[in-house]
Amino acid sequence: MNMFSFQRQNGQWQRLWRQQQAAGPVQRILAWLVMGVLLVAGFVLLLVMLLLSWLLIPLFYWRYRKKMRAFQQAAAQAQQQYQQQADQQSSAGHRVIEGEVVGKKEE
């Protein structure tokens, strides 16, 4: 059943191909012109996209660097605040002694 469907479809394609080959010169010229216009339009669209990407890359790079600078400044401020808090705690007499439990008696 499937093989007959393929043969029928193949026959339809061959008939369509013969009809297209029998087309007049005006139809062929028109088909070539339409295809040429579509190719030129595609090329122009590709060129516009390429130029647009070249223009947008520096803009995105500048925005990325701006965000990174803001992040680095925020990190530096946080480091300074942490250092100030640590200095205040050490000057107030609060000390943290780190140690390790070696043995623990269980009662």
Image: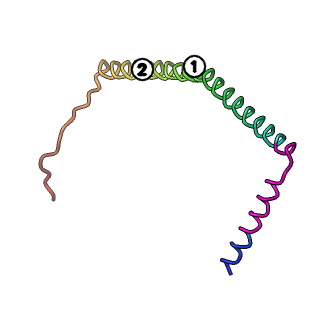
Q: Mark 2 points at which residue?
A: 81
Q: Which mark is drawn over residue 48?
A: none
7 drawn magenta: no
Residue 5 picture location, percent across and down: 71, 75
- Label 1 crowd (10 A; few <14 / some 14-19 / many >=20): few
The residue beneath circle 1 is: 58
With 107 as the anchor, is 94 left or right in this view? Answer: right
- Count how many numbered circles sit on residues in the image: 2
- Which secondary structure lies at badge 2? helix
Magenta segment: 10-28
20 lies above or below 71 = below
Measure the C-alpha gap from mark 1 to mark 2. Answer: 35 Å
- Closest to the camera, between mark 1 and mark 2, is 1
Against 89, residue 14 (above or below) is below
16 within the magenta span = yes
Q: In which quarter of the image is residue 16?
A: bottom right
Residue placed at 13% from the left, 54% from the top? 105
Q: Which of 32 and 92 is in front in this view?
A: 32
Of the pair 50 and 84, the residue shown nearer to us: 50
Residue 70 on image: x %, y %: 51, 20
Q: With 20 as the anchor, is 63 left or right in this view?
A: left
